Each structure stands twice: as structure tokens, then as C-alpha cells.
Image (spheres, grey):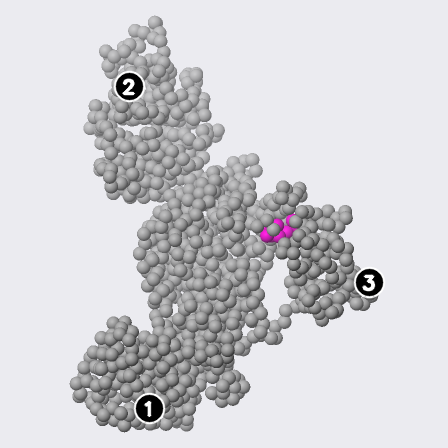
Amino acid sequence: MNSKLEIVWTPHPDKFITWGSDICLYEVHPLKNNINTNIKLCNTNGANLISSNSNHPFIKCLDVHPKVDSDLLMAIGNLYGKVSLLSCGPSSGFDPQALTGKDLVPRHSRPCNAVLWNPVDNNVLAGCLDKYRSDHAVLLWDIIKFPPVNENNAAKLSMNTVQPAVELARPVAEYGISESAHSLGWFKSNSKQMVVGMNNKNIKLLDFRDPNKVVISNMTKAVYGVCVDPHNDKHLASYLENQTFIWDIRNFEKPIITLTHLKPVVKIEWCPTKYNLLGTLQKDSSCIILYDIQRTLVGNEEIEPSVLERSVLPGSPHNITSFSWHRSDESRFLTIALSGSIIDYTVFDRITLNWGATSSVVWTYGCKTMKYIQDNILNDISYKIKKRAKLEYGLKDEFWKNSDIADDDMLSNVWNWLYLSEQLVENNIFGDKDIVKNMYYKHPGVQSILKIDANTNKSELVTFNWADLGNPNCSGSVRIFKHEDRQRAMHLCSWDFESFTDEILEFVEHLEKDHAYTRAAAIAVFNLKVKLAIEILGKAPDHASDGHSLQIVAMALAGFCDDKNSTWKQFCSVLRTKLTDPYLKAMFSFLTADNYNYDNVLNENGMAVDDRVAFACLFLPDNKLHIYLKKLSDRLLEEGNLDGLLLTGTNADGIKLLQRYLDVTGDIQSTALLAVQAFSEEVSSHAAKHWVESYRNLLDTWQLWNERAKFDIMISSHRPNEKHSQQVYVSCNFCGKSISACIQGLNRPRGQFIRMGNAANNKLKVSSCPNCRKPLPRCAICLMHMGSKTESLNSDIENNKVLEFAHWFTWCQTCRHGGHASHMVHWFKEHSECPVTSCTCRCISIDSITSTMFTS
Amino acid sequence: MFEAQEINAEHKDLIHDVAYDFYGQRMATCSSDQYVKVWDQNAEGKWILTSSWKAHSGSVWKVTWAHPEFGQVLATCSFDRTAAVWEEVVGETPGPSERGIRHWVRKTNLVDSRTSVTDVKFGPKSQGLQLATCSAEGIVRIYEAPDVMNLTQWTLQHEVPCKLPCSCISWNPSLSKNHPQMLAVGSDDANPINGGKVFIYEYSENSRRWIKLETLNSVLDPVHDIAFAPNLGRSFHILAVATKDVRIFNITPDNSDPSGVTKLDVQTVAQFDDHGCTVWRVCWNVIGTVLASSGDDGTVRMFKMNYVNSWKSVAIMKGDGSLAPNDGSKNLSNALTSISQTARYIKLGSIITPKEREASWH
């Protein structure tokens, strides 16, 4: 039996045939719930067996008639040379020419190696046969018109060794007596010519109008799988063992390309939907290798082509025995494995893509289409940056306004803190503000404020007894440390009240207003006001904090007892770990702490950084406080957490923190803005210049030019030393002296235009040169001198309002003619040439960007 | 919410490259059909084909825009062994709109390569008008237009031999004066024995030549595309490499060496084999926080940085524009919360103070 298993697409776009010992016709269906499909081809398609035929066990080769019809006509060549015509369609009834079942038999029996329908002249069928001593190897039949039986040769022809009883269907042409033919291909452009791989030693190009003459032939052993490029009749491919050759028939001696493979080739086929794409299958492999053959002309000469190789894994579970390209669907093919599993696979075209500044991603989909989407689905930081930039984020001098725009907790905190510390400096909290600014940079951080050390500048230790503070159950005490630096640091942490006094009440009230009950309670407890905390928690509405009923917490708190062995303490120590609210956790950690060890409070990461720092300032001895702050600021730096600015302040460490924040988030905007707004010029290193430059470039890319200009203005307000030079100088035509200097007193020129005749403020008008008193140039339209005020000539100018800009004097950069801006705009609405007599300059279309702006 | 728009490109063969201009409002495509097409976005956001011309006599591999301060300038490179610079000019005869028809004129043809020119890229604008090309013969060429007003004059400044066939090139886009010019070059050489396939070069002001600083020896498979992320002030450069998978490298320059030679600390921070096969292209969003890649599996995938050195897949699009199911969106929300975790509690105290004072001012 025949163990080979082949697959081929039929001309019908949804049908394919597999053949081995049986011939099976399948139809492809999309996989849907309501249609039952026998076999699954891929994720989207399945196939149903329509018919099968097992009457042709010795099948050697098969080709489907290229005409799409309701019936599919196949030619089957078998091991004994017989070529049978077989119809395998759904309607097997009507067959006007009675072709189905017809056999085309050679005179002598030997394997038929290939059959192929002519792609142009569809009635012509060619067959290739092995060698037989006195018979031809290539036979050509016309299935409609069999030539009339020649009287003289009739007897000779009717004899055949295969099926003597059957009358021979006479071939219209024959070629190659006592030769063998292995494979063949037809040309699309010339239906009379074919190429045949013959005798294991050459590929011959035959013309059947004169079968005795070979048009061209070459010497090669690669005579298998000969096929003609469907898009270029000059190119053919053939293979031998583990090499594939591409031939150009104009230069047939040598292959133009030799492709070497690791394993013997089983099948090659040109892709019918792509140019110059050859698919190859190797023995014992589960991948199809595609070769994209690139050719080009340099001058008029075709240079050596090059090949892009690409291997495609259709996902076949076993080694593929055959594949077939779909005839019309782009890059689609079927593969079949020996196990019979069939895969329907579409090779994806290589997608190229790009990402535009307008946040749109474009990619190619096939040759014909491109797809693009907006990247806002990603919710990326770039999106926020753009949104904030449009709201003039970071440009406000009152820092807290920026925090409202930021719409991000961490950034809001930073701007608010900058505002707070600025206020504290202004209010001389840290001493005289001028001295402070010199000492501590613009915004001092906690670490630089705390000048205490264990030897010379000690903090004062104060011990409170819990019992004295109104906690009758308690016997122990609590130690706190006092120093004016500590108090200042706590101000920076927004604890702007004198510790342990009733000033805290106001602070706590604000927190309650913002529903931060647990935070208020915790801060009250840290200030040793347990009763106050109980009151706060008692006032909280049910479920104010997720999951906890705060009243119940208040109840627990009411039983506060610091006796080591008390049940309260033991229970609270265990149960506090079950709390989720970080402030409640910290509160109980504090109350249950032993030996003044407050690590659980200090390392409670859910607590805001400033609360932790303020807590440390109250309860940690000097040396431990420094260690703790160092550790904390190192960690925040590592995380790129801008809360760390509280500790570092706006010094060089602050710049490091900003750099880290930028590295982590990519938020160039806040980084650049903070560097400019909060850091003095000496501190912000060249890194900051790079940030500013990058941010400006980003704004330009987004065409947020106005925002960029405002950013520039903001920068210059912080950097008064950087002056921008004037862009344009105007000098008198006659004496050559500058008239800009005179005008400058009135108006400062900016941009491309010199503003003249300011309508609002025209006390001093210059219409002649201040030096030589000669008149200034005239407007080409109204013929008034530059600097003289004009009424609008054209009352139809939109909104009929004389804009200041209309009186600006402007001119073409090329021909240097010009006049009042409004007149020029009006003129160029209808003209492309300069308004000055005999000047043919097409001022308005010279710059392609201008024309883009005008047309859009 | 999610909808892919479609543009009818109508190239006759595979499109090899698509490039946005600086503002993202113009687009250029190039194809194996040897044509280059330019598209402009109209007021409604639709892309309109404004120019199409046969640019080369072979497949056009890449197309790229110059910074707009140099005018409307494109560069292309092709299998026909040349690279070309094109400028859009206003035609002599006034068009129907009386503004003159704009069309693209070949300003120069760079013919130094003896093999296919595989990539072309304009240098950062701070260095004037520079153009880098690389070719299959393994030579990177740096051209410069000494007079930016005259694009017909280009001088070949440097030829840098790479030894392996080059497939792609990327300039480091950093605007910082502290970063010398840097180029990354990828090779599609298939033989792992030839070593790393990505090379990093830096221009040395002292010796006035390009010096190879680093070979990324971890990339042994053919490289098809390479892209530096926009630097935007980071202390390190991010390089994406399209090979059999998507790789992301952090490259930290260290200029402290007294000899003036930069040392690079190269870290592989991400490696995604999500495509499951050859990755064809990589590109960055405008601030370098999201990477998009395309692969032979016919999908476009996006990767986003959650935290420094931690990247996650966030979106998968099929080639036809439909969104493939991805757990990425889940990852995304995780990512967002993890960033702001330390600031979960608003520092209410600091908010109160200013608000209150604001009220008292009025």
C-alpha cells in the first residue's frame, strides 16, 4: 500500500483534498457552536469530509482541474501509468462531456510521476512517466478534443500493454522517447511551453507546437519538484536531496540561487498570493521554511538576488508529509502529517509598527492595510503628563494649587509640603528667613533641621507617668525627648502644634473633618491624650474605616492599662496584628510597647512618612533618631518615593531622590518642575538642565507650544540671570542705523514680528527713522508707512474687530516685501504671489509648513 | 473604548517600515514594491495619502523622518544598495489651491555600500543633521550635511566596521551634553558561534572616532530590530532588542574613568518570549515607559514598566486590530496600586493648612 499522504487545495476556496490510499474531499467551515465539524484545523476553522474514494489504491500523483465549478475534476496518475479522470463533487450527476471515469492510458505500463493541468488552456493535461524503451515520457492530452485516430497508425496505437481492451485516448502530443520524466511545470504566459525535469540529469523547456525540438535545456541532477513562479515566468525552482535551486530561464546554465537545507527536501511550492515567496518542506520536520527572494536592479543590471529565510511552525504534532498553499487567501496553507492530522495555517506577514507622539500606535496588517489605536487604554504616565501639562501643572507659584492638578497622592503631598515649608520659612519658624535660606537651601528637610547630637547639643528627657495623664489603670511612664529642633522638625511634618498641649485639638478637628478618624486618634495617643483618642473614635460613624467599627476600637482603648501582666496588654499585643488600619495598628503598638521600643510604630509603612518622622522626633533618643532618619531616607531614596523630600529637603540628596523617582516612574514632568520650582540653581546640577531640556522637548513634540512658553517664562522667573537675546533687528533702509532701540522703549519685540503702532498705547509712533528722519517702508497694500496707524481696509475681516496683531508689520523672508499683517493675510487668501508690482515671489507657499497650516 | 482604526495603505507588496514624524502628524511607509508613501492627518484625524513615489529599484527597508527644524526631510534605504534623502518642496507651477503642489525630491543618493543598506536613522538634532546607515556587509556609515540648508551635500564622516552583517541601528536620543553620541547596532547573523549580535558604539571627542564600548554577549540569535527609549533625564539608557524574544537592557554609563572612555554597566532587565517566535519590531512610546513589539505570531504586544527593572505585558493586539484576551489588564491595575502604595494615606494635615489660608485671603 501507499504510505504517503498528500494534501492539496482545490480551486474552490473552501475545499481541499487529501490523498494517499484514499482520496478524500473536505470542506472547511468556521468553527461555531451550531455546526458540527469532524476535524479541527485551527482555532477558527474545522472541516467536514464530503466524500471519499478508495477505488484508486495505486495513486502516484494528482492534480485538480483549475476551473472552479460545482464539480471538481481531478486527474489521477497511478503506479502503472494510467491517468484517470475523476469527479468528486457534491453533484455527481451532470457530466456533459462524460469525462468522469475516463482513463488515459499510455502504451506501456510504468509509474506516472506527475500530472498537471495547463493553467491557461484548461483542457490540456500533461503527464510524466518513467522510462520505457520505445515509448514517450511526456504525454499531452486534450480532454475535449481527442485527435481523430489516424488510419495508418490506428492498429499500432490501439495496442497497449496496460489495458488492451480499452481504446486509447490519443495524446495530442508526445515527447521524449525512451527517456524518463520526473516532474513538470507549465508557464502562465505561454500555454504551449512547459518545463520538465528529465532523466535525472536535465531540466528541459519544451514547446509543444514543435515537440521534436527542445527550446532550452540545462544540465542538473535537480529534476524534482520543478515549478514555475506564478508571478514571474522566468523563474523556476527545483530540488534534489537537500538542495533547492532557483533558475532563471534567460540564463539557464547556472542556478541563480542555491538553497542548502539540513535535510532532504520533500516538497517545494511557490506561494500564489505573494511575490517571490517559495515554501519548502523537508523530510522529518514539522516546519515549513519560506524563502523570500529579493531581486533588484543596479543601473540596468540585475544584481545577485538575496534570500530572506523564515521558518514557520504551523503547530503540527507530527512530522509534516505535505503542504499546500491556498490559491487565493493570502499566505494561507494546509499541512498534513502522517498521522492524518491537518493544520490550516496562515503565515502572518511581518508586522512593522511605530509609535507616534500623538499617542497612537500604528502597525501594518498585510500589504494593503495599516491599523492604528490610541494608547490611552494603557493608562500610562505619559497620558497623565499630557493632561497635567494642559492644566498648567507645576507653573503655579502657589505650590498647593499644583497639588490639586496633580491628581496623584504622592505628588500632591510633595507640592503641599513645599508650600508648608515655604510658609514655615517665611514665618521665621526656623529663625530669620534670610539666614535660613542661606543655611538650609530653599526648603529645609528634617535631617538638616535636626542639629542635635548626643554630646553637645542634647535633647531634654522628660518622663510622664501615664497615671498623671488621667489613665488610672496605669502605673508606668513614658519617655519623651524635647528640643527646639525636634519641635521645628515636627512642624515640617505638618504637626504644627505644641506637643502635649491643647493646641492639638484644632489639628485633630481638621483630621476629623476629613474623616481621617484613625489618624486623628493615633496622633492624639502619640501626644499621650488617650481620652481624646477615645472621644474621636467614639464620634466616628459606623464603618468609617474599612471593616472596623471604630466605636468598638474606642471601647478597647478605654481599657488601656500598661501593666505588663495585665490582660489588656496581653490581648492587645496579640490582636493588634489582626488590625488592618495602619494607624490603629501603630496606636496599639505604641500603647503595648515594652522598654520604650517603638519599632513596630516606626516601621509601620502604611503610616504617612511625616507622621512616622514626627513620632520619631517625639520618642527616639538623639542617636537613635539620627539612625532611624538615615535608614528611612535611604529606603525612600531607593524606592524613589518623593515623600523622602521631607527628610532630605531640597539639597543635593533631594536631587538624587528626584533622579531616582524619575528612573522609577519616567515622570519627567514633575521631576523637571520640582527641580526648577523647589531647588536653587546652585543645587540643581546639570542633571536638572537635562531634565528641563527633555521636558521642553516633550512639550514641543506634543505641540503644546504655549505651555512650553509658559514653562520657559516660569524658569526665567527662577533664573533671572539667563537673558534671551532679541531675535530680529530692524534698521533703517537709508542710514542703516537700528530703529529697534527706539521702538524697544515702547514695545518689546517678540517672535517673528515686530509690533508697530500698538493700538492701545500709541503715544509715541515711529513712522520715520529716528536718526535720519527718512520715512520707514510702506505697507505694500495700503501704502502707509510702517508705524502709522491704519484703519482696517476690509470690514469683512472675520469678527470685524481690529486686532492689535493686524497692525503688526510683517514681511516675506525671501523677497522682503511686506506690510500690515491683516493686509497680508487678506491678500494671500486669494493670491499666491507677492502684492508688490513685478515681484513674482510666491511668498505664502515657500514654506511647506505654512501651507500645511493654512490648508488645515 | 478600544477600537483599531484602519488605513488603506495599498502597497503592492509587504510594508517594511512605517515612521511617524516628530509631531506624530505625518507618516511615511515603505515597501517591497519599491514605493514610499507619505500620509498626513487631516482635521478629523483621518490619514490622507499625500504623496507616493517609486523611491528605489529594490525593496525599501526603512524610512525615517528628520527633525522638523531641518525641514520636511525623509531618508530611505533599500536592497538596491543605496540610501536616499528626500525633501518635500513646493512645485514651480501653482496647483489648484494656488499654493503650489508639494512633492518629494531626491536630494542625495548615498551609494557607498556594496550590499543592501538595511537601516537608516537621523541622529539627534543637537548634533546637526547626521545620518547613520548600516549594511549587510557589516559597515556602519555616518554621514553629515555640513550645511543644513543644502541637503544635496553629504559627507561620509565615519565608516565603522562591525564584522557581522548589520540589520538595524538606533541612536541614543539623549539630549544631555554629558552623554556622548551613542549608537546601538544589531546583526541578523544566524550563527551563534559569531558571538553577541548587539554592539554599542560611542563617539569619542578625543580620538574623533566611533569606539565599540560593548558587545551584548547574551544576544546570540539574529537581531531584527533595536530601539533606544527616549532618555528623558533618566540616569540610564533603556535599549529594547527584537530577537527570538523581546529583551530590555538598562545601560548605565559611567564617565568617571580618567581616560575619558565611558564604561557601560549593562543589565538585562526583561526578557519576554510571549510571542513564542521571532520578534520583528520594537518601538517605544514618547517617554519610554511602554514598549510595543510585533512578532511572527501576528500579534502586537505591549510591555510596561511597573517599577524600575520590572516590566509586564499589558496588552496584546491581534494583527487585525482586535484585542486578544490578556491577564495584562489585571497586572496593570496591580502595577498602579503598587506604585502609590506608600502614599496611600493623604497627608491631610498638609492639605489643611493652605486651604484654610486661602479662605482667609478672600
**Span of residues in magenta:** A843-853
| Residue shown at 41% from the left, 94% from the top | A456
Separation (CA) of disc 2 from disc 3: 103 Å
Report if residue A595 is visible in the image.
yes
Separation (CA) of disc 2 from disc 1: 107 Å
Instruction: Identify the residue under disc 2.
Output: A94
- Secondary element type, mark 1: strand
Instruction: Identify the residue under disc 1.
Output: A480
Determine contact: label 3, label 1, CB under 8 Å.
no
**In this rendering, is residue A473 above or below A587?**
below
Percent from the top left, x then y, of residue A216?
Answer: 45, 24
Instruction: Identify the residue under disc 3.
Output: A774
Q: Amino acid at mark 2?
A: Phe
Q: Earlier in the sequence, mark 2 or mark 3?
A: 2
| Residue shown at 51% from the left, 89% from the top | A432
Q: Is residue A848 shown left or right of residue A224?
A: right
Percent from the top left, x then y, of residue A404?
Answer: 45, 71
Report if residue B248 is visible in the image.
no
Decide which of A508, A138 is in the foreground and name it.
A508
